[in-house]
Amino acid sequence: SAVISQKPSRDICQRGTSLTIQCQVDSQVTMMFWYRQQPGQSLTLIATANQGSEATYESGFVIDKFPISRPNLTFSTLTVSNMSPEDSSIYLCSTWDRYSGELFFGEGSRLTVL
Amino acid sequence: QKEVEQNSGPLSVPEGAIASLNCTYSDRGSQSFFWYRQYSGKSPELIMSIYSNGDKEDGRFTAQLNKASQYVSLLIRDSQPSDSATYLCAVSNNNDMRFGAGTRLTVKP
């Protein structure tokens, strides 16, 4: 399984600011996913990020609010723009083993917006 | 209708008992099914995967899949306090993965 590192692990942000979360994988992967997990809730898929193409966003998520970069096969970033308290959540980067179908997660980035 | 449904719990069982967790899904095109365990403040970790109808056993864990009924379950035998966590059912159609809301399990010593 791939080892996935995320940073920051946690941050406290002011309303109206933006924060970029970085995700580094120790091997080349085609598909990377970004999930959000709000307090007490399950995981919600934000977008799928494939290298060399624009990210595909799920219903309710837009590129202006959650721009994603995927410059190569081992790295991706998610930016949470113009944050509000409703964006307080854990954001998780994940990769997919297409042969087994298993999804592997980074440690998560816990954002608190004041 | 939610794509993946689970009872949110909490489910409480005594140590040594069998814990039974259930999940239903709506997409008949789903191919792969997973159970993840998530401790508080941690990211999910995979504990079981199942791809075909029937039972799959791994140690104290048994996953059961019935595609006709669109039903997946996880049995934990000889439950331990360390099994106390939230269990997430996940379903994949090989394009993406959808998660249930999770069932919170508490195993009491």
Image (cartoon, rainbow, N blue to C red):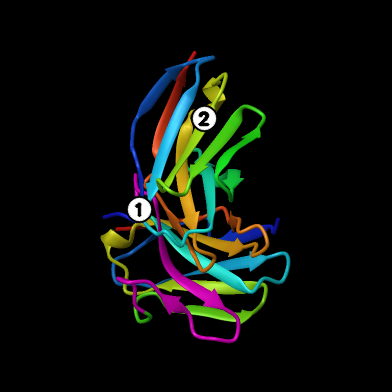
Q: Is residue B66 above or below residue B99?
A: above
Cα–Cα span, label 1 and label 2: 27 Å
Q: Position of residue B26 (x, y in %)?
A: 36, 55
Segment colored magenta: A38-62
| Residue at position x 45%, y 78% in the image | A56
The chain to which mark 2 is attached is B
Q: Name the mark nearer the viewer: 1 or 2.
A: 2
Residue A48 is marked as none
Q: Is residue B14 above or below residue A60?
A: above
Secondary structure at badge 2 equals strand
Residue B40 seen from this side: no
Secondary structure at badge 1 equals loop
> What's the amino acid at mark 2?
Leu
Q: Nearer the viewer, residue B32 or A9?
A: B32
- Please tell me whether residue A32 belongs to the stretch shown in magenta: no
Q: Position of residue A14 (x, y in %)?
A: 33, 64
| Residue at position x 52%, y 38% in the image | B64
| Residue at position x 47%, y 54% in the image | B91
* Disc 2 target residue: B75
Q: Position of residue A55 (x, y in %)?
A: 48, 80
Q: Position of residue B32 (x, y in %)?
A: 55, 55
Q: Are marks 1 and 2 in contact (CB under 8 Å)?
A: no
Q: Nearer the viewer, residue A9 or B59?
A: B59
Q: Is residue A18 above or below residue B50?
A: below
Q: How many marks?
A: 2
Q: Nearer the viewer, residue A109 or A18?
A: A109
- Please tell me whether residue A52 belongs to the stretch shown in magenta: yes
> What's the amino acid at mark 1?
Gln
* Disc 1 target residue: A38
